[in-house]
């Protein structure tokens, strides 16, 4: 496991930050974590950033330090690998502050999933499995914005990066030993894509709970209303649902016509919002309502569950589970049931299927395709089957036996 750091340094002035960044700049790997709140704001309230090399650990206070340029320069250094656990929100903060991604990066939660620790293993559980250390949980819901921070808070924050280093080393070694380093590169492609952190207000309607119950024209209206809400929430730095909940958005989208005086009749849309933003809401509604039919949102096609689909699905899922068991990862990491169902539904076409051009499906890309995707396609074609091993009585994958069956055995 290597030696663990026993101490950390709290940084709250520019001179100490410069010295700390000089020390950290000599490292080839840095473990990074952030503490933040976003319950009452649109953008995360950045409260603390923890950074550790193998030799030193620093807790840097962004509330006391107004200029973090030396730190951001470090985060954006392409010669230094940045290690996170569940990186998405930490990376988002760095992108919001710098406009750039902290590449290269290594997400221990993603790596752990590829090595059989579970799809979204928590940091504390992972530390205990790798190092045997049980981290205290007493500060999980602490107020990181309040100053001064207590000794317990600081120790809790430091542990998040001090123990991240041995976890990273263990996972990186296992990935190499089991030849899964390229799997990690594929899995992290979304994390390393700038578009992941770009805000597209016109796409926010897909996140509105209940959007799938609307008709196409209503979806066009919802798209405009949700985009308006997103932009206003950003401007005011408040949570989108504090401005306007999903339910009144759906109610507005279902309206056959809309006038300002009707807004007061919408449940969940308070009079203050109606009075202040009435004209804007009606204008957004009208834009969606008048949208050309060809520009209406296209909802994903539902699988065609014709006769036999469920049986095919269960057969394909058995293959997925077998493959997942062989490589000791959770089956839903390899292929979700909905992905396999879409494939089974497409396979209903039988001879009409263009096997050289299957549908775009997550399990037919990259390492998943090699591990299970190709065999799923072969099974749909009847070129692969499952049978019980005569000795172990466990299912195994085999080539079809029907055409090769002895004459006295019914095919």
Image: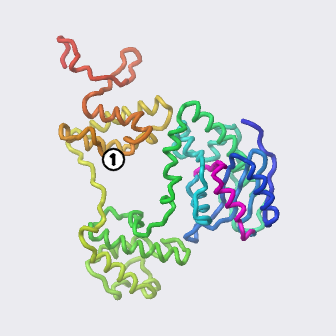
Tell me if residue 344 is in the magenta stretch.
Answer: no
Quadrant of the snapshot with the C terminus? top left
Q: Residue at x 28, y 68 (%)?
A: 295
In the image, 327: left or right of 95?
left
Q: Secondary structure at mark 1?
A: loop
- Residue 289 point in image, percent of width and height: 28, 76
Q: Name the image colouring.
A: rainbow
Tell me if residue 76 is in the magenta stretch.
Answer: yes
Number of marks in picture: 1
- Residue 303 point in image, percent of width and height: 27, 49
Rendered view: 184 above or below 207: above
Rendered view: 238 above or below 11: below
- Badge 1 crowding class, 10 Å Cα cut-off, few under 14, some 14 to 19, many 20 or more, is few
Which quarter of the figure has residue 380?
A: top left
In the image, 339: left or right of 349?
right
The residue that disc 1 covers is: 360
Quadrant of the snapshot with the N terminus? top right
- Residue 236 point in image, percent of width and height: 54, 78
Q: Identify the magenta region.
A: 65-86
Q: Residue at x 30, y 45 (%)?
A: 359
Q: Residue at x 42, y 76 (%)?
A: 228
| Nearer-the-camera pick, 298 or 211 | 298
| Nearer-the-camera pick, 146 or 83 | 83
| Nearer-the-camera pick, 347 or 123 | 347
Which quarter of the figure has residue 134?
A: top right
In the image, 43: left or right of 203?
right
- Residue 107 point in image, percent of width and height: 58, 47
């Amino acid at each position: 496991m290597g030696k663990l750091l026993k101490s950390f340094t709290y940084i709250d002035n520019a001179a100490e930050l410069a010295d700390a960044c000089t020390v950290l700049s000599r490292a080839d790997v840095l473990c990074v974590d952030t503490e933040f709140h976003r319950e009452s704001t649109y953008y995360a309230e950045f409260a603390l950033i923890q950074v550790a090399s193998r030799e030193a650990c620093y807790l840097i206070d962004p509330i006391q330090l107004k200029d973090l340029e030396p730190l951001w320069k470090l985060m954006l250094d392409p010669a230094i690998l940045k290690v996170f656990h569940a990186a998405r929100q930490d990376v988002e903060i760095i992108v919001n502050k710098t406009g750039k991604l902290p590449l290269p990066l290594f997400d221990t939660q993603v790596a752990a999933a590829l090595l059989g620790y579970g799809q979204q293993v928590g940091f504390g559980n992972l530390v205990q499995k790798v190092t045997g250390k049980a981290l205290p949980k007493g500060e999980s819901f602490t107020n990181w914005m309040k100053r001064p921070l207590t000794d317990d808070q600081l120790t809790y924050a430091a542990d998040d990066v001090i123990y991240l280093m041995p976890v990273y080393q263990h996972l990186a070694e296992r990935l190499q030993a089991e030849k899964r380093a390229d799997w990690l590169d594929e899995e992290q492609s979304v994390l390393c894509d700038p578009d992941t952190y770009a805000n597209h207000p016109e796409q926010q309607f897909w996140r509105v709970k209940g959007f799938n119950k609307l008709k196409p024209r209503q979806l066009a209206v919802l798209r405009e209303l949700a985009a308006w809400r997103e932009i206003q929430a950003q401007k005011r730095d408040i949570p989108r649902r504090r401005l306007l909940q999903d339910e009144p958005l759906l109610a507005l989208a279902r309206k056959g016509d809309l006038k300002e005086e009707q807004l007061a009749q919408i449940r969940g849309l308070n009079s203050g919002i109606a009075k202040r933003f009435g004209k804007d809401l009606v204008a957004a509604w009208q834009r969606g309502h008048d949208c050309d039919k060809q520009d209406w949102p296209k909802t994903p096609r539902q699988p065609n569950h014709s006769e036999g689909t469920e049986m095919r699905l269960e057969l394909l899922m058995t293959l997925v589970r077998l493959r997942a068991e062989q490589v000791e990862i959770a089956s839903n990491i390899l292929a979700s049931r909905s992905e396999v169902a879409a494939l089974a539904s497409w396979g209903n076409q039988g001879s009409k299927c263009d096997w050289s051009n299957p549908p775009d499906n997550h399990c037919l890309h990259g390492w998943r395709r090699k591990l299970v995707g190709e065999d799923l396609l072969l099974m749909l074609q009847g070129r692969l089957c499952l049978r019980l091993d005569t000795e172990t009585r466990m299912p195994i994958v085999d080539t079809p036996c029907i055409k090769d069956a002895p004459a006295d055995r019914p095919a």
